[in-house]
């Protein structure tokens, strides 16, 4: 248990989510442990709640919830594309990013496709930040449990490289019609670059969850707790 995890759980209670901390107290054998816990959790949840029950997966130590569950459900149902599983999107592509996931934009005619994205949305010189969130991020995933179980099993069977996000990207290349990317940030915003509170992060507009990727050091964890305070009134 860490203060940031405690803050996440408090925010889930406040905004009317039921939750479970998968893998809590179990040995950590590397990033593939996360996918193993996801597969086990979905098998059990499908039995308990049924194959169509909706589940959300978020990282434990760098995510906060700011919007009620009924509003997230509304956003999920109102999304522009109807693939059942949705990943968050982010504005950077570092070592753990499988860049060819940009082919997804050709498959679904989103943002003009990969060529347009690479021509118009690349970072300015000296910056790693693309102009819109277009890359897969596994810190937030939502979908029906049957679809999630199938997907996580497929990712677990994909030859593991780098970390879970990179491996998920490899899986995605053969399943481009089976998932959505929340490039509109209707449900999740990955806070990379600008960590300050934005006007639409008010619990009514904007995303329901905020993810501050890669914040693992004690100093980064302390900074996140300070940023969370800006959302306490949501």
Image (spheres, rainbow, N blue to C red):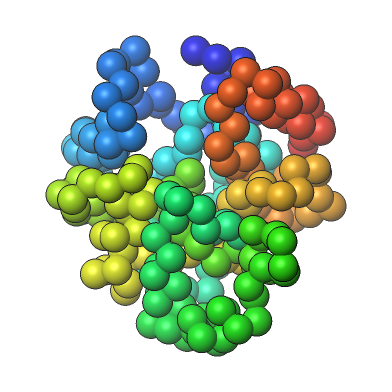
Q: Name the foreground residue: 73 vs 93.
A: 93
Judge whether residue 152 can be spotted in this image. Answer: no
Q: Quadrant of residue 183?
A: bottom right
Judge whether residue 93 can be spotted in this image. Answer: yes
214 versus 71 height, above or below = above
* Residue at 58% in and 18% down: 6
* Residue at 45% in and 51% down: 95
Does residue 100 appear left or right of residue 67 in this picture?
left
Question: Which quadrant does the C terminus fall into?
Answer: top right
Q: Name the foreground residue: 83 vs 160.
A: 160
Residue 73, image x, y percentages: 53, 53
Does residue 39 appear left or right of residue 221 in this picture?
left
* Residue at 49% in and 29% down: 60
106 versus 67 height, above or below = below
Farthest residue, direction front? 126
Residue 62, image x, y percentages: 58, 32
Q: Quadrant of residue 212?
A: top right
Farthest residue, direction right? 199
């Amino acid at each position: 248990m860490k203060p940031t995890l405690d803050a996440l759980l408090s925010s889930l209670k406040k905004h009317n989510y039921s939750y479970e901390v998968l893998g809590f107290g179990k040995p950590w054998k590397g990033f593939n442990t996360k996918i193993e816990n996801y597969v086990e959790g979905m098998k059990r949840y499908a039995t308990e709640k049924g194959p169509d029950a909706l589940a959300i997966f978020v990282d434990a130590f760098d995510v906060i919830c700011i919007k009620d569950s009924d509003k997230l459900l509304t956003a999920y149902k109102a999304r522009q594309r109807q693939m059942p599983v949705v990943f968050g999107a982010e504005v950077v592509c570092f070592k753990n990013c499988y860049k060819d996931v940009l082919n997804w934009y050709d498959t679904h005619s989103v943002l003009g496709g990969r060529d347009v994205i690479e021509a118009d949305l690349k970072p300015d010189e000296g910056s790693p930040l693309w102009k819109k969130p277009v890359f897969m991020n596994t810190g937030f995933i939502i979908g029906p449990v049957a679809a999630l179980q199938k997907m996580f099993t497929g990712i677990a069977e994909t030859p593991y490289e780098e970390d879970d996000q990179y491996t998920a990207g490899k899986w995605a290349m053969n399943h481009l019609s089976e998932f959505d990317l929340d490039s509109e940030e209707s449900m999740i915003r990955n806070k990379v670059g600008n960590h300050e509170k934005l006007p639409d992060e008010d619990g009514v507009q904007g995303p329901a969850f905020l993810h501050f990727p890669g914040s693992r050091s004690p100093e980064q964890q302390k900074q996140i707790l300070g940023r969370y305070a800006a959302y306490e009134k949501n």
